Image: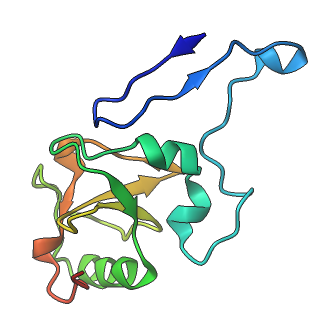
Amino acid sequence: MEGARQACGKTGIVRAKPRGPAATHAPRLICSESRAAANPAEAMIDKRLLDILCDPVTKSPVRPLSAAELDALGRAVAAGKVSTEGGAPLKGAPSAGLITRDGRTIYRIEDDIPVMLPDEAIATSQIDDFPRP
């Protein structure tokens, strides 16, 4: 068996080598059409992938943005008030995103792929009406 252990301290995924006709196909972890949910990020990200993702800086777990959080982010982006940690202004509101459990950092999801780069992180402190836990 092959195993992988994740840096954020969560148990890694251990899979046996695939056999038969499916052995040539890699498992698809991102799947927007298989689950319907009120939250776009939940519909986009497979639970197995969400369980292993973490903030690349603090190593804290992430969760999908709620509809209210996504709306607040969209309004702030439309007003031109949001920039990434790298200093680049956000030009368009993301359709989905992930947020750290402490509610301080957002990572957008583009084309069903989480952008988990420290320079692309979005601090929630710059969003005036962002819902706080």
**Residue 105 quadrant:** bottom left
Relative image position of residue 109 (x, y in whole percent): 43, 55
Where 22 falls versus 84 (above or below)? Answer: above
Task: Identify which residue, 132 or 40, lies in the foreground.
Answer: 132
**Residue 19 quadrant:** top right
Task: Identify which residue, 3 or 24, lies in the foreground.
Answer: 3
The residue drawn where x is 55% and y is 63% is 42
Relative image position of residue 21 (x, y in whole percent): 89, 16
Where 83 falls versus 20 (above or below)? Answer: below
Left or right placement of residue 30 versus residue 60 in this view = right
**Residue 130 quadrant:** bottom left
Left or right placement of residue 68 versus residue 87 in this view = right
The residue drawn where x is 22% and y is 69% is 103
The residue drawn where x is 16% and y is 42% is 57
Relative image position of residue 111 (x, y in whole percent): 53, 51
Left or right placement of residue 71 versus residue 27 in this view = left
Where 71 falls versus 51 (above or below)? Answer: below
The residue drawn where x is 25% and y is 47% is 55
